[in-house]
Amino acid sequence: MRLLLAIFLPFVAFFTIGRPIAGIVCLILQITLIGWLPAALWAVYALSQYTTDKKIASARQL
């Protein structure tokens, strides 16, 4: 679900992972059609980093 948000509404994906300032910057970038692709790529990358960080944190607790 977050991956679809990262592709179609990149700024919302940042708010769901707890990065509101990056979400606002992404929204400003996304307002232009040329900036939509970099914003979507940035959101997908940030989402992958978020899931990796969650996996590492859960592995440390074991």
Image (cartoon, grey):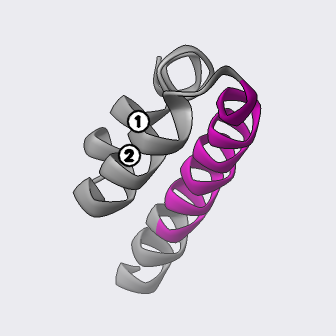
Q: Residue furthest bottom?
A: 60
Q: Residue at x 24, y 55 (%)?
A: 20
Above or below residue 20? Residue 37 is above
Task: Say which mark, if any, is on residue 24.
Answer: none
Image location (x, y in percent) of residue 1: 47, 17
Report whether 51 appears left or right of 16.
right
Main secondary-structure element of the magenta-colored stretch? helix
Report whether 12 appears left or right of 30.
left
Judging depth in this view, the residue of 5 and 32 nearest the camera is 32
- Mark in front: 1 vs 2: 1
Instruction: Estimate the spatial distance between the alpha carbons at disc 1 and disc 2, rounded to whole Å.
Output: 5 Å
Q: Residue at x 44, y 85 (%)?
A: 60
Task: Say which mark, if any, is on residue 11.
Answer: 1
Residue type (three-letter) at the residue carrying disc 2: Phe
Residue type (three-letter) at the residue carrying disc 1: Phe
Q: Report how many numbered discs are placed on residues in the image.
A: 2
User: Mark 2 and mark 1 in contact (Cβ < 8 Å)?
Assistant: yes
Image location (x, y in percent) of residue 14: 38, 46
Above or below residue 59? Residue 12 is above
Magenta stretch, residue numbers: 34-53
Q: Could you tell me which secondary element the residue under label 1 belongs to? A: helix
User: Does the magenta segment cover residue 45?
Assistant: yes
Above or below residue 13? Residue 56 is below
Q: Residue at x 54, y 42 (%)?
A: 29
Q: Residue at x 35, y 81 (%)?
A: 61
Q: Could you tell me which secondary element the residue under label 2 belongs to? A: helix
Task: Say which mark, if any, is on residue 14.
Answer: 2
Above or below residue 48? Residue 59 is below
Judging depth in this view, the residue of 5 and 29 nearest the camera is 29
Image location (x, y in percent) of residue 53: 51, 70
Image location (x, y in percent) of residue 52: 60, 63
Badge 2 density bin: few <14, some 14–19, many ≥20, Cα 10 Å: many
